[in-house]
Amino acid sequence: MLKRFVQLAFTLVGASAGYYLGPEFFGALQKSPLKFGDVPAPGYIGGALGAVIMFVATIWLSNNVVKWIRWSEERLIKIPAADGVFGALGLIFGLIVAFLIQQPLSSLPIPGVNHVLPFIFSGLFGYLGFRVGYKKRDELISVFTLGRQNKEGRNKKEGRETFEHKILDTSVIIDGRIADICRTGFLEGTLVIPSFVLEELQHIADSSDVLKRNRGRRGLDILNKIQKELNVKVIIYEGDFEEVAEVDSKLVKLAKVLSGKVVTNDFNLNKVCELQGVSVLNINDLANAVKPVVLPGEEINVQVIKDGKEHGQGVAYLDDGTMIVIEGGREYIGDRLDVLVTSVLQTSAGRMIFAKPKLLERAL
């Protein structure tokens, strides 16, 4: 169908050119030494000849034109909508500036230059406008979303309910606890899954390493579970930041564009977000916040699992996974015993409890 359309378009162009150039062409033949006779209706005959010539030419030319159109179509489809819109706006703005500059240039008293410079400036400013609009799309989106942010701020002041974007990173998807948090309803708003995070998950799922492959597949299963089973709004962000290579940096830029929060359990990404003023929700911080509070002097009954790093130490774990280091607990490996908490160490990576056997306290 596309090939037929190209052939028809070229045929119409040939017919139009032949119709307007036919009288001049046949008039020139009459003045030539060949003494060509009068041609009735030279416009129509010229149009017919032009249509035939262009139709014959498109027999081998149309295939190349169709290939070029297909290639252009594929390239345009791959461009995110936001990139294309802001690139087109920049192009239009650049052409408007070029048009305003062309008016004084066309009046220059320099033969030839006043006809060439307008085309040069049109191409130059059109290209610059497109590149600026394409490269500065993130900042322009931030400008356009400023009104939305102000509206959300007014809604909050008025007590109306507002929702914001929660952007998931690869680590929190693979971790899997995000599905349980969404099920409880503690995480409000719209979950945003960037396309570059999905690509990273797919690469991990296709890895030759068995552990990585299982982690990637687990992440994809978690996403399917969130989309199909949970009552949570999920959107896939198709845009990309081609000038940025690292996925973490792309997440930070996306959070700035959407004015959202990054949901992660990556300690390094957490610090980067804090440095760049991006709000972040760390699943590990949430898990630590809901762990039972243990104070020095409290008594806990635990089972010693293994020996510790230091001499004579034993290691036990609470039900929530908190590690307990027991001084002198090595000899009780495999047994349950009562211990007294001596100190609690709280870090972003987790909570660690130091204790000593209660029997030792009684002996003292």
Image (cartoon, rainbow, N blue to C red):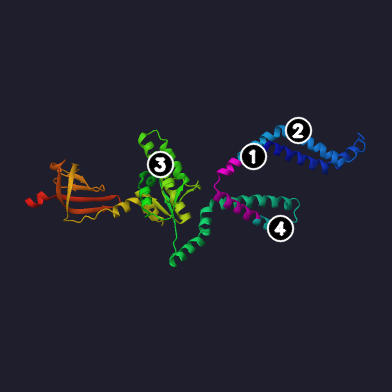
Q: Are marks 4 and 2 in contact (CB under 8 Å)?
A: no
Q: Residue at x 39, y 33 (%)?
A: 208
**Where is mark 4, residue-wise?**
103
Nearest to viewer (mark 1 / mark 3):
3
Q: Position of residue 80 (x, y in %)?
A: 54, 47
Q: Which residue is mark 1?
A: 69
Q: Residues within 10 Å of mark 1 (few under 14, many from 20)?
A: some
Residue 205 lies, in percent from the top left, at: 41, 37
Residue named by callout 2: 56
Q: Which stretch did the figure color magenta?
A: 73-95
User: Do the CB atoms of the residues marked 1 and 4 lie less than 8 Å apart?
Assistant: no
Amino acid type indicated by mark 1: Ile
C-alpha distance separating marks 3 and 4: 61 Å
Q: Earlier in the sequence, mark 1 or mark 3?
A: 1
Question: Which one is in front in this view, the residue at disc 2 or the one at disc 3?
Answer: 3
- Tell me which numbered mark, 1 or 4, is placed earlier along the sequence: 1
- Is residue 270 a member of the stretch shown in magenta? no
> Alpha-carbon neighbours of circle 3 within 10 Å: few (<14), some, or many (≥20)?
some
| Nearer to me, 231 or 315 | 231
The circle drawn on residue 221 is: 3
Q: Amino acid at mark 2?
A: Val
